[in-house]
């Protein structure tokens, strides 16, 4: 299973690369925010992870849907950078990750005692990734 991680800083990338193999996920990582111009990075991955610092346009949401992305996890508490209703209308589920803020900027994962991701969407381990700022 793969996930494309958009808007990923170098500090986040280190943590994603460390955690991903433990939960059986192959990450495709880019510092670039998701856009129509780089949708090809998500090809073959049904899940993406996005940061909160860039607005995701409806045209990018449509392009993601056309690339067979069905799940968008945002590394944020809120959704104000994504038109969730539009995303759902084109076939994408959007979720954030519940977390307790950690001033150390550590990677958080929703996982059971064996380290398996607990995802609302069983198609994806995308929801397990959360970086606090």
Image (tube, helix red, strand yellow):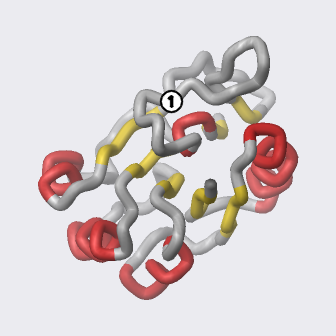
The residue shown at (57%, 21%) is 99
Locate residue 54 relative to residue 128 in the image: left or right: left
Quadrant where the N terminus lies?
A: bottom right
- Above/below status of 106 relative to 35: above
> Does any portion of residue 133 appear in the rendered image?
no
Residue 13 screen position, x and y as percent: 77, 57
The secondary structure type at the circle numbered 1 is loop
Query: As rendered, which of 91 and 15 lies closer to the eye?
Result: 91
Q: Is residue 24 above or below residue 107?
A: below
Position of residue 102 in the picture relative to residue 1 (left or right): right
Side of 39 where 108 appears, left or right: right
Q: Residues within 10 Å of mark 1 (few under 14, many from 20)?
A: some
For label 1, the residue is 119
| Residue 84 pos. (x, y %) | 22, 47
In the picture as drawn, the residue positioned furthest to the top comes out as 113
What residue is drawn where x is 49% and y is 82%? 40
The percent coordinates of residue 121 (x first, y second) are 42, 35
Q: Is residue 36 above or below residue 23?
A: below
**Image point 65% across, 60% down: which residue?**
8
Image coords of residue 49 (percent x, y): 53, 53
Image quadrant containing the C terminus = top right
Q: How many marks?
A: 1
- Tell me where residue 36 sits by quadrant: bottom left
Which residue is depicted at the point 60% across and 16% down? 100
Residue 3 seen anywhere in this rendered image of the structure: yes
């Amino acid at each position: 299973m793969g996930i494309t991680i958009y808007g990923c800083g170098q500090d986040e990338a280190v943590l994603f690369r460390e955690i991903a193999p433990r939960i059986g996920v192959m990450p495709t990582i880019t510092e670039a925010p998701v856009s129509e111009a780089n949708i090809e990075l998500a090809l073959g991955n049904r899940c993406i992870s996005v940061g909160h610092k860039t607005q995701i346009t409806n045209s990018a949401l449509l392009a993601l849907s056309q690339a067979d992305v069905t799940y968008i996890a945002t590394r944020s508490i809120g959704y104000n950078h994504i038109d969730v209703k539009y995303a759902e209308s084109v076939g994408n589920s959007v979720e954030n990750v519940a977390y307790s803020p950690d001033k150390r900027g550590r990677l958080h994962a929703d996982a059971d005692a064996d380290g398996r991701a607990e995802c609302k969407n069983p198609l994806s381990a995308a929801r397990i990734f959360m970086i606090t700022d």
